[in-house]
Image (cartoon, helix red, strand yellow):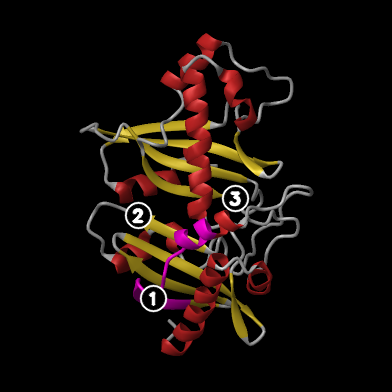
Amino acid sequence: MATDPERTPLEKIWAEVRSSFLEYRLDDLRRILDVPVGAPAPNRAQARQFAEALPDLGRARFLKIVTVGDWAAYYGQSGRDVFVIRFRKSGSGWKPAQAPHTLSSYSTDEKIDAEALISREPSLRPVPGEPAESPAPPPAGEPQDARPEAEIRRDLVAVSRRIRDAFAAGRPERASADLLLEEGAALPSPDEAKAFARDRLPDLVRGQFLKLGWRADKPQLVGYYVETKVGTHNQSTVSLVAFVRHEGRWKFAAGPASIATVEGPKVNRAGLLKLIDSDPRLAL
């Protein structure tokens, strides 16, 4: 475990990231961050939203810093959110790890034991994936989404909401821009769309968010894990909804493997996260 000498430089770097977004200093951001080649630049309003979604270390509770090889993980707590900001060694200093591994957080309405949560929650581990493994480069022509997970999550919920609204109204054509159909596939009929919205498509707005899932070999693919049927007393339901980064935006990956739902005995959030990591039906 690292000690206080690492805390000040890491906090200074992160404060510079936030202020560069807030003040729209993109050249400074490119100096601080390893931005994937071809990644779209945010406009001024988007940059401010990014900054506001990032933890403010001056207001958060500092927990600890853990170093593993050339990684440094800064842990903090803001209210009922526990987060980790990851950095990679760069020369004699540090740089934020490349997205999507820069920032991970865990939010819950339950009382938090931060140390116990960090030790058991895979999304909060110091090094994502295998130690010393860097994220795989994105496929040619499709830049990796370099934004914070909070912003990506917001986009996914918005995509899902537009699809649900269009399908529930029997107007699937309204959601065509948010769908990535398999080659040769056609939009569903109005009745099929209504049935899909009613019976198969999880409601990401009403459900309880659990986490985003990533694959190091396919950074253009993300899984949104959500607990649905939250009010059920004797049963837990976890759904996976897959999205694909295509032509610079996230789309619903329509197809047989795009949604998976698993039901089981009622468990708490920690049990649901364990289920996600252990049940092959929920593998991304």
- Residue at image location 57% in from the left, 63% down from the top: 130
Please provide the residue range marked out in magenta: 48-66
The picture places residue 119, in percent across and down from the top left corner, at: 36, 65
Identity, as a three-letter code, of the amino acid under mark 2: Ser
Badge 3 is on which residue?
215
Q: Quadrant of the C terminus?
A: top right
Q: How many residues crowd mark 1 within 10 Å: few (<14), some (14–19), many (20+)?
A: few
Tell me which corner region of the image, top left, top right, bottom left or bottom right, holds residue 229: top left
Q: Nearer the viewer, residue 212 or 190?
A: 190
The secondary structure type at the circle numbered 1 is loop
Q: Is residue 29 left or right of residue 7?
A: right
Residue 100 can be seen in this image: no
Residue 25 can be seen in this image: yes
The picture places residue 154, in percent across and down from the top left corner, at: 48, 46
The secondary structure type at the circle numbered 2 is strand
Residue 51 within the segment the image draws in magenta: yes
- Residue at image location 56% in from the left, 45% down from the top: 222
Specify the label residue 58 is tagged with.
1
Dot 3 or dot 1, earlier in sequence: 1
- Residue at image location 69% in from the left, 26% down from the top: 182
When the figure is inspected, residue 43 is found, relative to residue 67, above or below; the finding is above
Q: Nearer the viewer, residue 43 or 9?
A: 43
